[in-house]
Amino acid sequence: MTGRNVVIDGIDSKVVLNNGVELPYLGLGVYLLSSGYEANEALIYALEIGYRLIDTASYYGNEYDIGKAVRESSIPREQIIVTTKLWNSDHGYDNAIKAYNESLKTLGLDYIDLYLIHWPVEGLRQDSWRALEKLYEEGKCRAIGVSNYTIKHLQELLDQSKTVPAVNQVEFSPFLYQEELLKFCKEHGIQLEAYSPLTRGNKFSHKTVMRLAQKYQKTPAQILLRWALEHGVVVIPKSANEKRIWENANIFNFSLDENDMQLLNNLNENYRVSWDPTYIV
Ligand code: NDP
């Protein structure tokens, strides 16, 4: 029990999205996971120890490897959530449909579980969203959502569309505690997913993070991931290394107390490791 109205106590913990689809609270991010041996080994291991959500994108160049690992796994297809994303150069209604079909073909799967708009491309994102709505209506993806959307982008989408995105995937860590966006998403039934939840390791040696790691007998990575979970946010840390894939999953047997959550909340400094979407009109 987290004390913050969510129970997240096992690797199989899931949140129910606004359309009823269940999304695991923990996923494996695969950005910069090299296509071929590295991706294959990481995926096989992650699935073996209980990861059931994989976050790829056409931009990452490893959709083929993800699909292959999912197809070859002994885990039933319906138990694995595969996320992929529409890249910036594929925006617009027709282009988005085409890009979806290409991703599906590269993955070698029959459907995509969660299809996201990767970035709120100016002038075209609403046409792309209509394409995602169409794909969803046709049953070609189980859920649709967005990524890197600010409150402004979400409000525009809500005002102009009939489908509320199931997910908004954004950069989120104690050092980029997007409190208003999280509140907005909760109010509108949009699940927030944290990318770069580990700050790519850049903040592991921050003194507060180190102190809490010592206190809870956990690693800095586990403290950062647990903080996001306690906020009810799905995490998708990337690792190519078995030891760290395991470490990042070992976050369900402890809980941060209210004071320590507050200490971490207070670390916000709008620190980003990735692009800043707030300037996108
Ligand atoms: P993360 O914050 O997940 O950090 C990944 C880095 O941390 C890697 O270098 C990894 O190295 C290292 N690492 C992982 N676990 C540990 C650990 N326990 N201890 C020490 N180091 C560790 O960054 P990402 O940017 O990769 O974000 C995660 C995922 O989010 C991406 O892979 C992608 O799926 C998604 N994403 C989405 C974006 C979007 O625009 N929608 C943008 C950026 C990311 P190693 O592999 O050697 O373990």
Image: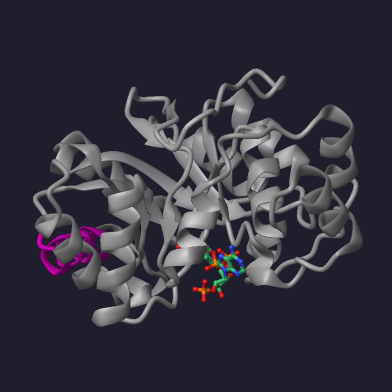
In terms of image quarters, where does ligand 1 lie?
bottom right
Q: Residue at x 32, y 28 (%)?
A: 21
Q: How is the image coloured?
A: one colour
Residue 95 colored magenta?
yes
**Nearer to me, 93 or 116:** 116
Q: Position of residue 87 (x, y in %)?
A: 37, 69
Q: Residue at x 61, y 38 (%)?
A: 229
Q: Residue at x 15, y 54 (%)?
A: 73
Horizontal side of residue 26 vs 86, given as left or right: right
Q: Position of residue 133 (x, y in %)?
A: 29, 41
Query: Magenta-highlighted stretch: main secondary structure?
Result: helix
Q: Position of residue 11 (x, y in %)?
A: 44, 38
Q: Position of residue 85 (x, y in %)?
A: 36, 60
Q: Residue at x 84, y 28 (%)?
A: 258
Residue 258 against residue 47 in the figure, above or below: above
Image quarter (top left, top right, bottom left or bottom right) of the C terminus: bottom right
Res 274 quadrant in image: bottom right
Task: Confirm whether residue 225 shows in the render.
Answer: yes
**Nearer to me, 2 or 173:** 2
Residue 220 colored magenta?
no
In the image, the segment drawn in magenta is 94-108
Task: Confirm whether residue 238 shows in the render.
Answer: no
Residue 142 against residue 152 in the figure, above or below: above
**Nearer to me, 150 or 57:** 57
Residue 103 against residue 172 in the figure, above or below: below
Horizontal side of residue 57 vs 188, given as left or right: left
